[in-house]
Amino acid sequence: MEVYLIRHGIAEERAHNIKDEERVLTKEGRQKTEKVAQRLVHLDFHFDVIVTSPLTRARETAEILIASGLSSQLAESSHLSPDGNIQNWLTDWLEPRNYPQKTQLALVGHEPNLSEWAEILLWGESKASLVLKKAGMIGIKLPEIGSPLGRSQMFWLTPPKYLL
Amino acid sequence: MEVYLIRHGIAEERAHNIKDEERVLTKEGRQKTEKVAQRLVHLDFHFDVIVTSPLTRARETAEILIASGLSSQLAESSHLSPDGNIQNWLTDWLEPRNYPQKTQLALVGHEPNLSEWAEILLWGESKASLVLKKAGMIGIKLPEIGSPLGRSQMFWLTPPKYLL
């Protein structure tokens, strides 16, 4: 199984009159995310399911990917919110769904979570060693058998600027 | 300092009548490497120095990068050969040169060395967790002060297919 960790696009700044979970993508954030999505389409990407954090800026990012034709399935998981835990996502969300081996999943979420999840998948622990920019992505292959924690392989990590 | 680890392109197969260190790039290997180089030029890359393993397939790859205009400086380091060691490269090659902070270095070499070097830079040890394809590359930022071992950050890892 391949899992693509995608960080949401550029969103409006934090402010005391806006709830963090309701911050929306800026115009620039939408445009850049659309360009990234178009490049992924050009590279023949297709995801069986796009799973998004419930926060607005992540959901809007996921909706742009869907609108570009990168997937027809959108799901939500609270484990992808900023305080989500990968172990819980694996046991509560991924394992019960029993996806076939060839499944390509895209997860849209936040930093520092996503790069920490990637490190935990690769090395079993996180040392803040990966840089994941907004609208950037990480591609990871999970092992066919057994726990993916500390046993997965990374084949892609890119900032959006190399996809424009 | 940014260090780009670049794996040589597709080379002719091992055979009893060819010395491993003299294997050359195939026609397909040359073409794919040239396309990757062109894409890097398009993305505004420029390396202050390209350092190559002394083996023919690495040197030919480095020469394609130079011919594309990605750098005007070609150097060789035996530490980049398949049995090279990153600690020795750091102490014997990099440190004596005392490059300025903003230097962008490209290292052309072999697997599994390069992805092991990347893991040692990020986490201090290697677990074969990174997949680096032929003519693919890894981008790593070294810390400004102190040893880079276990203290560097990766911002890019790409197979050539996403650069064509």
Image (cartoon, coloured by chain):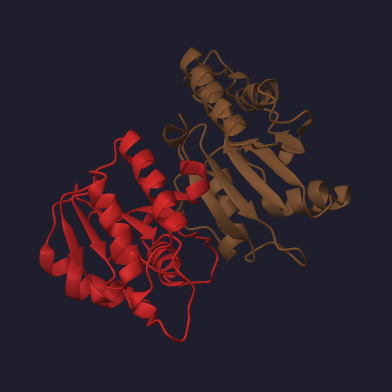
Chain colours: A red, B brown
Total marks placed: 0
Asked if A3 appears above or below B18 in the picture, the reply is below
Q: Quadrant of residue A124?
A: bottom left
Asked if B106 appears above or below B123 in the picture, the reply is above
* Residue farthest bottom in this picture: A16
Left or right: where does residue B88 sit relative to residue B133?
right
Q: Viewer-proximal residue, B60 or A77?
A: A77
Question: At 27% from the left edge and 45% from the top edge, which residue is drawn?
Answer: A68
Question: At 56% from the left edge and 15% from the top edge, which residue is drawn?
Answer: B18
Question: At 52% from the left edge and 23% from the top edge, which residue is drawn?
Answer: B35
**Residue A143 shows in the view:** no
The percent position of residue A46, horizontal first and vertical second, equals: 24, 43
Left or right: where does residue A107 sit relative to residue A118?
left
Q: Viewer-proximal residue, B58 or A119?
A: A119
Question: At 30% from the left edge and 62% from the top edge, which residue is drawn?
Answer: A60
The percent position of residue B99, horizontal first and vertical second, equals: 84, 49
**Residue A53 shows in the view:** yes
Q: Viewer-proximal residue, A8 or B75?
A: A8
Q: Quadrant of residue B108?
A: top right
Q: Quadrant of residue B66?
A: top right
Asked if A118 appears above or below A100 in the picture, the reply is below
Q: Viewer-proximal residue, A97 or B9?
A: A97
The percent position of residue A42, horizontal first and vertical second, equals: 34, 34
The percent position of residue B146, horizontal first and vertical second, equals: 77, 67
